[in-house]
Image (cartoon, rainbow, N blue to C red):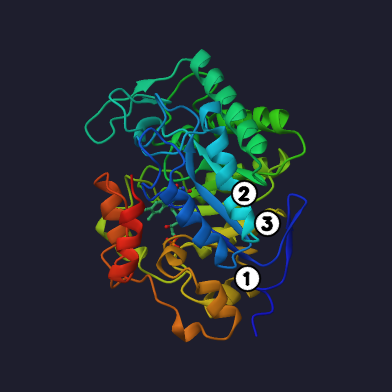
Amino acid sequence: MFSHLFTPITVGGITLKNRITMAPLYLGYAGPGGAVSPLLLYHYRLMAQSGAAMIVVEGSTVDHTLGSGSDRTIRADTDDNLEGLGRLARTIQKEGALACLQINHAGRFAGVAEPVAPFGVETFGKLPRALTSQEIDRIADRFAQAASRAKKAGFDMVELHGGTGYLLSQFVSPHTNKRDDDYGGSLENRIKFPLMVLSRVKSAVGDFPVGYRFLADEWLPDGLTLQESVPFAEALEKAGIAYISVMGGTYESFFIPEMVEKCKAVAYMADLAAAVKNKVQVPVITAGRIKNGTVAEQVIADGKADLVGLARVLMCDPEWPKKVGEGREQEITHCDETCPDACTQLVMKGKPAYCSRWSPKKVRQYKALFQ
Ligand SMILES: Cc1cc2nc3c(=O)[nH]c(=O)nc-3n(C[C@H](O)[C@H](O)[C@H](O)COP(=O)(O)O)c2cc1C
């Protein structure tokens, strides 16, 4: 019935058993200081048992001091976490899924007293400090070191977080990058930093797939749009990216009422993915309220994307892939517009996120493991 969705695909030389991936989803489950905690392992085991072909683990920091979203952001910047990262990768792989680690620098959205950014553009009342070119160079090395650590820990792939308005996308965006040196101005200059990061990462990890979470449109009046992001996607492909996982919006646009409405729609980012897919050959992933198998199948059959990414959708019902595969999609518990995005609200308050659709027993199980 779902002939596209359950057809294997090769990504960066590795075969995925179907077109279903878990899109990265930070839920605040790491231990204090970004350690791999029992709750994190419990949660990712469940996600991997779902039957999704690949689990992309949430944004993990390349710099705990300056680049973490919170103290609960997984640390990928220290060998102290190597053993934990290894356990996380093995936990996922043991359930028959591929494990991919997303690595990130939050830049102006870091949960730190003095955030850094490409330029001093006010960010929720704070003025971030503009990075020097030496610092930019060191951050590129940090991405390379974190990617090496992911490989050493046993992950199958690594994903650079160029979405949600974090540092990589802050360089690409005309809204946040107003530098007048080699990293600012023209699109060619603004994409220099993410391409440099990709190049350093690839040199560090060798024959190991590197994917990209890709901001296609900031949904801001003076922000990045498809006009500039699509040529950037083409440049990523030329530079050897393994896949492009497309998204829209940043923390500055997510909460604009018009955008809140837009994001309630089923498959609300599929058209952005389609615009990218139209210009590249590498596999493209789309996420965003992929409600059921029928929607996922259609998106792929229509050529809008090659794979789907389920984030809140899979957290809400980890049996989504099984139910779809077994012809029981009417039994899916839906993450939909009738929930006030409870998980996001909890995360924004610095709390661990539980799903409003979970049974009280399941919430108790999660709470019992939280440290
Ligand atoms: C609470 C929350 C945390 C998220 N964390 C990440 C993250 O760590 N990295 C990332 O690339 N996207 C992150 N996202 C975006 C998701 O990957 C996804 O694109 C989005 O939630 C839409 O898919 P969904 O409707 O299945 O949730 C997050 C989204 C939410 C709501």
Q: Residue at x 34, y 25 (%)?
A: 115
> Which three-letter amino acid code belongs to the residue tagged 2?
Arg
Q: Is mark 1 on a helix, strand or loop?
A: helix
Q: In which quarter of the image is the C terminus?
A: top left
Query: How far apart are the two marked residues, 2 and 3, measured between alpha carbons?
Result: 25 Å
Q: Where is residue 184 in the image (x, y as percent from the top left)?
A: 49, 26
Q: Is residue 250 visible?
A: yes
State the residue position of label 1: 300
Numbered tag placed on residue 90 in the rendering: 2
Numbered tag placed on residue 352 in the rendering: none
Instruction: Say whether mark 2 is within 8 Å of ligand 1.
Output: no
- Residue 94 location, quadrant: bottom right
Local packing at callout 2 (Cα closer than 10 Å; few below 14, some 14-19, many 20+) is many
Q: Is residue 68 left or right of residue 151?
A: left
Residues tagged 2 and 1 counted as in contact (Cβ below 8 A): no
Q: Is mark 2 on a helix, strand or loop?
A: helix
> Which three-letter amino acid code belongs to the residue tagged 1?
Ile
Q: Position of residue 256 (x, y in %)?
A: 27, 54
State the residue position of label 3: 283
Mark 2, mark 3: which one is toward the viewer? Answer: 2
Placement of 271 over or under 154, stated as above or below: below
Q: Earlier in the sequence, mark 3 or mark 1?
A: 3
Q: Is residue 78 visible?
A: no
Camera-side residue of 291 and 145: 145
Q: Which residue is drawn at 38% across and 40% down?
A: 31
Placement of 332 over or under 149, stated as above or below: below
Camera-side residue of 191 and 75: 75
Q: Position of residue 283 (x, y in %)?
A: 68, 56
Placement of 363 over or under 280, stated as above or below: below
